């Protein structure tokens, strides 16, 4: 898929088509969101890439031609890296000219990688709205539910063979290249993911009955129509189960591959697609992105036959497929409400969106799932003034929290201070209504809306003041929720996400590793989000405990699974009030590569898969409970793997070997002052020690860091 202009255009405004046929299969009826709209397409990319000048020329041409809605299914790898880009400025000019802009959020699949993050652009993430599953039942009874858009064979179990064992290793048989027809014909073949269409061609040419593709590293859940029975297992956990079954059954494995599943391959429907880039918006602390999500997975629409196997229709996935859904919805609203501005259209789409299944976190879903049937009558709209957008576009480091937008983002705000914002609510309905404000979620935040009750005549605007103050909300963690205004006929909801910055700012959500939480006691650094006097305390140092173990080796180059060969589990009980748990591995065998995976129940909380054996897994402020550390011999130099496992669990109120915390008397927001945690007495040589630090400012206690050291640093 080099380009997708035909697909996005037909998604936004294509005419209805009954009985869409792809490779001889009837996929039912499709229609663009706004089939009565007229389409103008501007070519700005060649070979899947292009220059800003060409894109800006296309935007300016569209504005000159009088379009009302622009769809921009283009983004940057890893998202925006500067706040006001030339393309963003072109979209600002388009917005000021009365054009609504919908743009894709990006397909990087992790937080902080948002593309097209300007406040005048409606930035769209992708949702899964059709499950499209397939299931494999292995010979040992294990069922794995994956994704498929093809017809799977069903019927009876068939022989299952791993590509690596059915061809030439030098040719890449593990990836389905260089297969031996005699070892494949009539069997289900399992291969590691590489280039799916090439792998399908190999499996088909060599007589395979079906193909199972798995990714040992985990990947995104993206389907394609291969016109061959293909089941895709995209998670590391699924890959581990399948791979280790194949290793245990190299000659007698079986698989029953059937269409359909139990819904477990996704959190539910609709849900945020795993490839959809999520917030926070790293370019602007005060802007929430994405703005909302729309159907983006397995979207069937028209395509250009060249480059699409001669097909006239095909299924694509991505935020590029979601953005035209919103563009089409905006076209419908502009036709029904020609007096609405682009900001009013954006507000109507966002304040009427609904929560997805699996999360109500606005960092992932923005305002929620597009609901066009509700957006036609939103009651109130919340739209920024043109002058404020121009000022934002001219600023070197714009924030955005003060813009009159239907959301509130407080990334890295000073948690020692109150935040006061205003929002202007305009009645776009036909009669006067009285609205009452309420707050949901936002645990530990003190939130008030004044006045709480507003009466707004048609066409008039009410101004409300919103105050937010950290109460018991955790430092350096997101709290999310919403403010909703309800009348007898309408419900107007804006999402809120706040992260009080203590000593560790971050560009990502709370699901990734916390940078800045592990420090060396001789070279401690903190990055405060406040200005003022600072004091602190520590638990003192306690040594990490090491124990020696042995286990049988597994498969060299294997894939982790808790039940795999070459895996040993170690459990730890973490009591309430713990500051951290640290687990480490070591081995003296230079030919052994150990990986370390830390779980709480069935949830992975830290995974380490580097190309050495000195792994470390850790959790700061862990929830109380039982944690399991799995040591996995990904490669081994002998039939028996000898290794050491170290661990320490630090209590917030622990009293260990005394140490002196040497802090500056005062800190400035955004600086990186250094400190030391100096042992009061010499430590045992060649032993690793850990401690917990905690800071205070103006009576507020701010959780600190997990501090390690050895005597070497103090000699």
Image (tube, grey):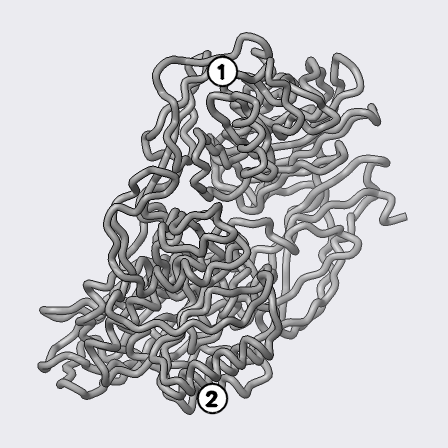
Q: Is residue 352 above or below residue 214?
A: below
Q: Is residue 111 above or below residue 463?
A: above
**Residue 505 visible in the shown view:** no
**Residue 158 visible in the shown view:** yes
Q: Position of residue 306 (x, y in %)?
A: 50, 53
Q: Is residue 222 above or below residue 282?
A: above
SS for dot 1? loop
Q: Position of residue 171 (x, y in %)?
A: 71, 28
Q: For marks 2 and 1, give the CA distance.
A: 65 Å
- Does residue 573 appear to the left or right of 65 in the view shown? right
Q: Quadrant of residue 369?
A: bottom left
- Does residue 135 appear to the left or right of 625 in the view shown? left
Q: Quadrant of residue 502?
A: bottom right
Q: Circle 1: is it few (<14), some (14-19), or many (20+) Cα within 10 Å?
A: some
Residue shown at 23% from the left, 82% from the top: 338
Q: Position of residue 518 (x, y in %)?
A: 68, 50
Residue shown at 52% from the left, 12% from the top: 253
- Residue underneath mark 2: 390
Camera-nearest residue between 229 and 419:
229
- Residue underneath mark 1: 186
């Amino acid at each position: 898929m080099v380009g997708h202009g035909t697909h996005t255009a037909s998604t936004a405004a294509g005419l209805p088509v009954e009985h869409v046929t792809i490779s001889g299969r009837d996929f039912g009826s499709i229609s663009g969101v706004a089939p009565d709209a007229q389409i103008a397409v501007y070519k700005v990319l060649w070979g899947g890439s292009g220059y800003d000048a060409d894109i800006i020329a296309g935007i300016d041409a569209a504005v000159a031609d009088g379009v009302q809605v622009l769809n921009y299914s283009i983004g940057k790898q890893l998202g925006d890296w500067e706040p006001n880009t030339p393309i963003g400025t072109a979209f600002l000019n388009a917005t000021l000219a009365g054009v609504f802009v919908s743009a894709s959020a990006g397909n990087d699949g992790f937080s902080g990688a948002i593309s097209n993050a300007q406040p005048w652009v409606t930035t769209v993430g992708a949702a899964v709205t059709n499950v499209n599953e397939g299931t494999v039942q292995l010979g040992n009874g294990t069922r794995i539910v994956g994704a498929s858009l093809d017809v799977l064979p069903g019927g009876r179990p068939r022989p299952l063979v791993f590509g690596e064992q059915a061809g030439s290793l030098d040719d890449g048989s593990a990836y389905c290249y260089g297969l031996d027809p005699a070892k494949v014909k009539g069997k289900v073949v399992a291969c590691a993911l590489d280039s799916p269409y090439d792998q399908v061609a190999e499996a088909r040419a060599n007589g395979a009955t079906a193909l199972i593709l798995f990714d040992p590293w985990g990947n995104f859940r993206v389907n394609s129509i291969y016109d061959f029975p293909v089941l895709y297992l995209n998670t590391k956990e699924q890959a581990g189960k399948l791979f280790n079954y194949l290793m245990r059954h190299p000659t007698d494995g079986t698989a029953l591959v059937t269409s359909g599943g139990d819904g477990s391959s996704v959190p539910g429907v609709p849900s945020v697609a795993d490839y959809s880039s999520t917030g926070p918006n790293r370019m602007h602390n005060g802007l929430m992105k994405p703005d909302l999500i729309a159907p983006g997975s397995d979207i069937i629409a028209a395509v250009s036959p060249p480059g699409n196997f001669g097909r006239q229709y095909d299924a694509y996935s991505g935020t590029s497929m979601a953005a035209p859904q919103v563009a089409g919805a905006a076209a419908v609203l502009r036709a029904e409400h020609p007096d609405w501005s682009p900001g009013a259209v954006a507000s109507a789409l966002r304040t009427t969106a609904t929560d997805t299944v699996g999360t109500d976190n606005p960092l992932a879903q923005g305002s929620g799932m597009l609901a066009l049937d509700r957006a036609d009558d939103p009651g109130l709209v919340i739209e920024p003034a043109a002058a404020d957008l121009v000022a934002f576009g001219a600023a070197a480091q714009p924030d955005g929290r003060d813009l009159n937008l239907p959301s509130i983002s407080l990334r890295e705000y000073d948690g020692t201070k109150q935040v006061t914002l205003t929002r202007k609510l305009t009645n776009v309905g036909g009669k006067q209504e009285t609205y009452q404000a309420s707050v949901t979620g936002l645990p530990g935040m003190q939130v008030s809306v004044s006045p709480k009750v507003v009466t707004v005549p048609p066409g008039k605007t009410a101004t409300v003041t919103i105050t937010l103050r950290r109460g018991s909300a955790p430092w350096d963690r997101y709290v999310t929720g919403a403010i909703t205004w309800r009348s007898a006929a309408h419900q107007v909801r804006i999402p809120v996400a706040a992260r009080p910055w203590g000593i560790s700012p971050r560009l990502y959500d709370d699901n990734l590793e916390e940078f800045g939480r592990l420090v060396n006691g001789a070279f401690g650094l903190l990055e405060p989000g406040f200005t003022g006097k600072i004091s602190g305390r520590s638990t003192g140092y306690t040594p990490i405990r090491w124990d020696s173990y042995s286990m049988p080796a597994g498969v060299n180059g294997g894939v982790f699974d808790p039940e795999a060969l070459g895996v040993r589990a170690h459990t730890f009980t973490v009591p309430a009030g713990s500051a951290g748990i640290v687990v480490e591995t070591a081995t003296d065998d230079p030919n052994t590569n150990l990986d370390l995976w830390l779980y709480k129940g069935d949830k992975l909380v830290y995974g380490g898969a580097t190309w050495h054996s000195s792994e470390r897994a850790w959790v700061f402020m862990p929830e109380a409970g039982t944690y399991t550390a799995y040591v996995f011999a990904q490669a081994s130099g002998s039939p028996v793997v000898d290794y050491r496992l170290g661990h320490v669990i630090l209590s917030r109120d622990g009293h260990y070997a005394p140490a002196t915390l040497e802090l500056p008397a005062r800190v400035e927001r955004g600086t990186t002052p250094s400190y030391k945690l100096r042992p009061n007495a010499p430590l045992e040589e060649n032993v690793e020690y850990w401690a917990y630090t905690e800071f205070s400012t103006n009576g507020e206690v701010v959780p600190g860091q997990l501090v390690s050291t050895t005597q070497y640093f103090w000699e």
